[in-house]
Structure formats: C-alpha cells, structure tokens
Image (tube, rainbow, N blue to C red):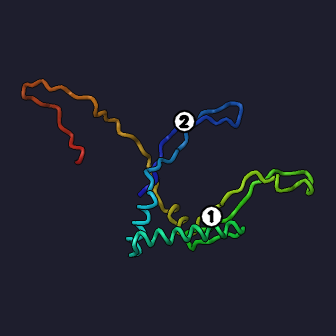
C-alpha cells in the first residue's frame, strides 16, 4: 500500500506578501470503524470479536485511569501516551498558577513498530480520472460502430 496525496494551492499568510504556493496534501482513503477493527483483530488473534471489544474497553479504561493520575502509559511497540499541558508564560514565578494553563491534552509518541511502518511506506500521487461517464455518444446506425464499449471491470 501507499500513502496518496494531491497537489493543492495554499495561501501562506505568515508574511505580508501572502504568497500562494503549492503543497502536497494527503488523501485519506477511508476509515475503519470500531466493529470492523475488532473483527480484524479477532481474525488475526483467533479470538471472538466480543472478546476483543471487551479487552479494548478494559485497555481504554486503564489508559484513562493512569493518564488521570498523571502517568505515562507505554503500549509496547505501539507507543506511549502521556498527559501534557499548555500554559501562558509569566514574568515572575509568583504569577504562575493553575489559571495560566489554557489547554490540557494527551500526547502520543509512536513506538518502533509504527515508526518503521511510516518509514517504509511508499507515497503515490493521486489523480482523479478525467473520464466523464455522463456524456453519451450517439451512434450513426449505419453498422459502422467506431465507439467502443469500455468495460469498467477490465
């Protein structure tokens, strides 16, 4: 498999010239829902989908409890989840309090398995087909058919 991208025009507004440039933007090819993911994991591991759902629910609960305690959680080669904050700076130490914190978040650092996948994956330019299937060509009816039928399954 490969990651797909399209080329898009983007206006960069961080300078006064507001330059337009072209950048590659990833095209997401779909989303796997939770039920289908549990079915796939069950097929790989030889476990029932319901068992997989139960284990994942337990994993999420344990992850939430440990993050709530301020701990980081390592999930093997998958990666590490850790709590983090964003805070406003102050000129004096006495001016720093909980009110300075404006954002709490979960930081995920991928492990070796995910890093290896991303380092090895190929990248492909994605283009949409130029064919317009809504236009129909009228035949002359003289038995001299030059319009060929294009089989979409071919």
Which residue is painted at 59% across and 68% down in the image?
61
Q: Which residue is mark 2?
A: 9
Residue displayed at 47% across by 59% down = 121
13 lies above or below 111: above
Query: In this rendering, would 94 be left or right of 126?
Result: right
Q: Residues within 10 Å of mark 2 (few under 14, many from 20)?
A: few
Residue 97 lies, in percent from the top left, at 85, 56
Q: Secondary structure at mark 2?
A: strand
- Image quadrant where residue 45 sits: bottom left
Q: Position of residue 54 (x, y in %)?
A: 49, 70
Residue 150 position, x and y percent, is: 21, 40
Which residue in the structure is indicated by mark 1? 109
> Which quadrant does the N terminus fall into?
bottom left
- Lateral position of residue 141 relative to residue 20, left or right: left
As measured in the structure, the alpha-carbon distance from the residue carrying label 1 to the one carrying label 2 is 30 Å
Mark 1 or 2 closer to N-term?
Answer: 2
Q: Nearer the viewer, residue 44 or 132?
A: 44
Can you tell which of label 1 and label 2 is closer to the viewer? 1
Q: Is residue 110 above or below residue 11?
A: below
């Amino acid at each position: 498999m490969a990651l797909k991208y399209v080329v898009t025009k983007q206006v960069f507004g961080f300078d006064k010239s507001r330059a337009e440039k072209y950048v590659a933007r990833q095209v997401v090819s779909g989303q796997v829902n939770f039920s289908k993911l549990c079915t796939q994991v069950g097929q790989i591991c030889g476990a029932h989908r319901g068992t997989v759902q139960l284990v994942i629910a337990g994993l999420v609960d344990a992850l939430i409890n440990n993050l709530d305690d301020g701990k980081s959680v390592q999930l093997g080669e998958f990666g590490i989840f850790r709590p983090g904050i964003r805070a406003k700076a102050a000129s004096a130490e006495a001016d720093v309090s909980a009110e300075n914190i404006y954002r709490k978040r979960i930081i995920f650092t991928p492990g070796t398995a995910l890093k290896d996948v991303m380092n090895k994956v190929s990248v492909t330019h994605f283009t949409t087909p130029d064919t317009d299937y809504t236009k129909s060509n009228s035949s002359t009816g003289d038995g001299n058919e030059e319009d060929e039928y294009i089989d979409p399954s071919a």
